[in-house]
Image (cartoon, rainbow, N blue to C red):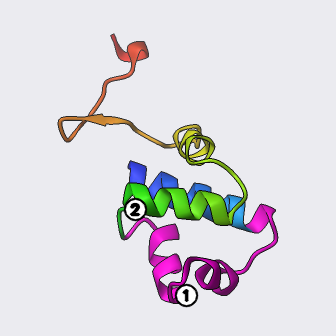
């Protein structure tokens, strides 16, 4: 899973944890529900501004939300567009 997908999953998990629907989160962000759905499904990349706005709406910090994304099982960090090899493979 790439960062967009992992970030979207982290947003979905946090949104559910704080008890918001996609429609409610969309209202807080002044977006349409479909935009939140696309974000949660990893179809779009969030700008830094959007990461901050989403984090604030979910009562967390951008750093915590990104850390949650990176800690998800299946997340594969990339460098130069290529997945990094894990140290275990060396």
Q: Is residue 27 magenta?
A: yes
- Up-down: is 43 above or below 88? below
Q: Secondary structure at mark 2?
A: loop
Residue 19, compared with residue 84, is above or below; it is below
Quote the CA–CA distance across marks 2 and 1: 15 Å
Q: Secondary structure at mark 1?
A: helix
User: Are the residues at dot 2 and dot 1 in contact (C-beta closer than 8 Å)?
Assistant: no
Q: Nearer the viewer, residue 83 or 45?
A: 45
Q: Which residue is mark 1?
A: 33
Residue 77 — which label?
none
- Classed neighbour count for the residue bearing mark 2: other residues with Cα under 10 Å, few (<14), some (14–19), many (≥20): some
Q: Which residue is mark 2?
A: 46
Q: Disc count in the image?
A: 2
In-front residue for pair 73/81: 81
Magenta span has 3?
Answer: no
Q: Position of residue 4 (x, y in %)?
A: 40, 56
Residue 7 pos. (x, y %): 50, 54
Badge 1 crowding class, 10 Å Cα cut-off, few under 14, some 14 to 19, many 20 or more, is some
> Which span of residues is magenta-colored?
16-43
**Residue ranking furthest to the top:** 90
Q: Residue at x 18, y 35 (%)?
A: 80
- Identify the residue at image location x=47%, y=42%: 75
The tag earlier along the polypeptide, 2 or 1, is: 1
Quarter of the image containing the C terminus? Answer: top left
Please say whether residue 81 is visible from this viewpoint.
Answer: yes
Q: Which residue is nearer to you in this view: 88 or 50?
A: 50
Residue 23 vs 13, above or below: the answer is below
- Residue 87 position within the rendered picture, expressed as x and y whole percent measured from the top left: 40, 14
Looking at the image, the residue that sits furthest to the left is: 80
Q: Residue at x 61, y 43 (%)?
A: 68
């Amino acid at each position: 899973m790439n960062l967009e997908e992992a970030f979207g999953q982290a947003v979905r998990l946090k949104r559910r944890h704080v008890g918001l629907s996609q429609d409610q989160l969309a209202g807080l962000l002044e977006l349409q529900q479909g935009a939140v759905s696309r974000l949660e499904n990893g179809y779009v990349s969030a700008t830094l501004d959007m990461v901050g706005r989403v984090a604030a709406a979910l009562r967390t910090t951008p750093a915590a939300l990104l850390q949650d994304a990176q800690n998800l099982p299946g997340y594969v960090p990339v460098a130069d567009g290529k997945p990094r090899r894990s140290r275990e493979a060396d």
